C-alpha cells in the first residue's frame, strides 16, 4: 500500500518527460510528494531521502511501463494519444514529447543494449523479488546469527540455485576469490574504504552513487562506508606549523647564502597579524622556494597563497572552458576510434 501510494503521488506531480530525477527543477515537486506522504503516513524527517529515492525508482519504472505497453499498438504503430487509463495524469503535449524522445534512434540503441545486458547478466541474481535485506533476515533467522553478514556472503547467497549450488562460472570465480582473500587476510567488513572489504577487493571498481553492491536498494556508499570528517585546525595549530616553516626557511637561507634564491624572505616577518589571524606571506614565500625557477617566473607577482595556487592550477590544468574543450575532443576521438573498429 505504501509503495502504491507513492506511485500515485509521483504520477500526479512529476511529468513523464523528466529524464533525470536529480534535476533541480524537481525540488518543488519533491517537496509536494514528501508533504503529501507525511499527511497520510507517520514518517520521521530522516526518512525523506529514502522515500524520495523510492519515488525516483517508481518514476523510472512507470516510464518504462509506458514504453513497453503503450508506446506502440499491436501492429507496431506509434500511439498518438496517451493511454486512456492515464489520461488524467498525462496531457497530449506531454505524451507527444515522450513518444518523440523514446522513438529517437539514439535512445532506441541505448535501450536495446541495456535490455540485452539485463536479459543476460554476468552475475545473475536468483532470489526473484526477495531483496538483499529480506535475504539477510532469512539467513540470520535460519542460522541464528547475531552479527550482520558480510556483503560478500550475501552476494554469494543471492546467486545460488534452489539446491544451494553456484552454477554460473563467473559467479564461481568471484566466490573463489572472496574465499581466498577471506582466508589470507584479516579484512574487516565495513571498512571505511569502499575497496578494502572482501567484495570490494575482488571487483576493485567504485560503487554506484545510489546503491552498494551486495546490499541492495536504499543503502548508499555514503551511509555504508562513513568517511571521517576532517577537523579544521585551530589558530594555535596553524601558527605552530608556520613557526616550523619559518625555521625551515631560515635554515635554507643560511645554508644557501652564496647562492641566488628565487625569493628573499625577511626573518622578522610577524607570525600573527594585528587582527589575530595568521600572516600568510611566510607561507607564500615557502611555496615559492618549493618550485622551480621556471614556475617562479609565473607566480613572482602573486601576493597571496590562493593567487599563487590558482595561477599554477590554471597553467597546468586550464580553465573550465579548456577542460570542457578537452573532454569534447576526447569524446570525438573516442567516437572516431569506435567507428574505425567497426
Image: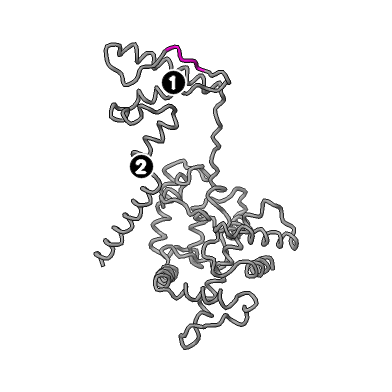
For numbered disc 1, what is the local secondary structure?
Answer: helix
Residue tagged 2 = 317
Q: Position of residue 187 (x, y in %)?
A: 47, 42
Q: Label 2 vs label 1: CA separation?
A: 26 Å
Q: Is residue 339 left or right of residue 302?
A: left
Q: Is residue 5 magenta?
A: no
- Residue closest to the eye, 229 or 251: 251
Rendering colour mode: one colour
Q: Is residue 55 above or below residue 148?
A: below
Q: Position of residue 154 (x, y in %)?
A: 52, 56
Q: Is residue 176 above or below residue 245?
A: below
Q: Position of residue 322 (x, y in %)?
A: 36, 48
* Residue farthest left in this picture: 340
Residue at 55%, 61% (x, y): give it: 21
Residue at 48%, 46% (x, y): give it: 194
Q: Quadrant of residue 17?
A: bottom right
Residue at 39%, 73% (x, y): give it: 105
Q: Position of residue 237 (x, y in %)?
A: 53, 22
| Residue range corresponding to the magenta coloring | 267-271
Label 1 neighbour load within 10 Å: few <14, some 14-19, many 20+: many
Residue at 68%, 59% (x, y): give it: 34
Q: Decide whether the magenta segment is chiefly helix, strand or loop.
A: loop
Specify the quadrant that holds the C terminus.
bottom left
- Residue closest to the eye, 266 or 123: 266
Specify the quadrant that holds the N terminus.
bottom right
Q: On residue 58, which mark appears?
A: none
Q: Is residue 5 left or right of residue 269?
A: right
Q: Quadrant of residue 215?
A: bottom right
Residue tagged 1 = 282
Amino acid at each position: 500500500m505504501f509503495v502504491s501510494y507513492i506511485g500515485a503521488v509521483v504520477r500526479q506531480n512529476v511529468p513523464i518527460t523528466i529524464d533525470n530525477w536529480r534535476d533541480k527543477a524537481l525540488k518543488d515537486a519533491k517537496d509536494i510528494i514528501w508533504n503529501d506522504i507525511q499527511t497520510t503516513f507517520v514518517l520521521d524527517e530522516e526518512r525523506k531521502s529514502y522515500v524520495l529515492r523510492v519515488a525516483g525508482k517508481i518514476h523510472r519504472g512507470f516510464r518504462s511501463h509506458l514504453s513497453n505497453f503503450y508506446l506502440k499498438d499491436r501492429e507496431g504503430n506509434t500511439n498518438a494519444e496517451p493511454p486512456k487509463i492515464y489520461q488524467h495524469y498525462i496531457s497530449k503535449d506531454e505524451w507527444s514529447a515522450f513518444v518523440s524522445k523514446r522513438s529517437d534512434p539514439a535512445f532506441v540503441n541505448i535501450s536495446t543494449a541495456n535490455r540485452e545486458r539485463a536479459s543476460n547478466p554476468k552475475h545473475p541474481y536468483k532470489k526473484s523479488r526477495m531483496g538483499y535485506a529480506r535475504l539477510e533476515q532469512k539467513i540470520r533467522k535460519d542460522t541464528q546469527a547475531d552479527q550482520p553478514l558480510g556483503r560478500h556472503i550475501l552476494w554469494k547467497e543471492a546467486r545460488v540455485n534452489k539446491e544451494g549450488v553456484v552454477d554460473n562460472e563467473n559467479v564461481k570465480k568471484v566466490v573463489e576469490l572472496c574465499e581466498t582473500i577471506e582466508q589470507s587476510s584479516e579484512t574487516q567488513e565495513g571498512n571505511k574504504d569502499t575497496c578494502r572489504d572482501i567484495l570490494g577487493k575482488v571487483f576493485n571498481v567504485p560503487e554506484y552513487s545510489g546503491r552498494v553492491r551486495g546490499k541492495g536498494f536504499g543503502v548508499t556508499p555514503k551511509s555504508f562506508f562513513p568517511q571521517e570528517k576532517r577537523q579544521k585546525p585551530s589558530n594555535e595549530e596553524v601558527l605552530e606549523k608556520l613557526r616550523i616553516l619559518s625555521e625551515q626557511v631560515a635554515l635554507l637561507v643560511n645554508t644557501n647564502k652564496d647562492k641566488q634564491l628565487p625569493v628573499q624572505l625577511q626573518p622578522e616577518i610577524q607570525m600573527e597579524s594585528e587582527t589575530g589571524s595568521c600572516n600568510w606571506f611566510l607561507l607564500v614565500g615557502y611555496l615559492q622556494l618549493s618550485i622551480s625557477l621556471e614556475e617562479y617566473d609565473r607566480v613572482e607577482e602573486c601576493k597571496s597563497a590562493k593567487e599563487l595556487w590558482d595561477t599554477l592550477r590554471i597553467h597546468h590544468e586550464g580553465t573550465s572552458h579548456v577542460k570542457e574543450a578537452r573532454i569534447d575532443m576526447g569524446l570525438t576521438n573516442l567516437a572516431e576510434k569506435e567507428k574505425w573498429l567497426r
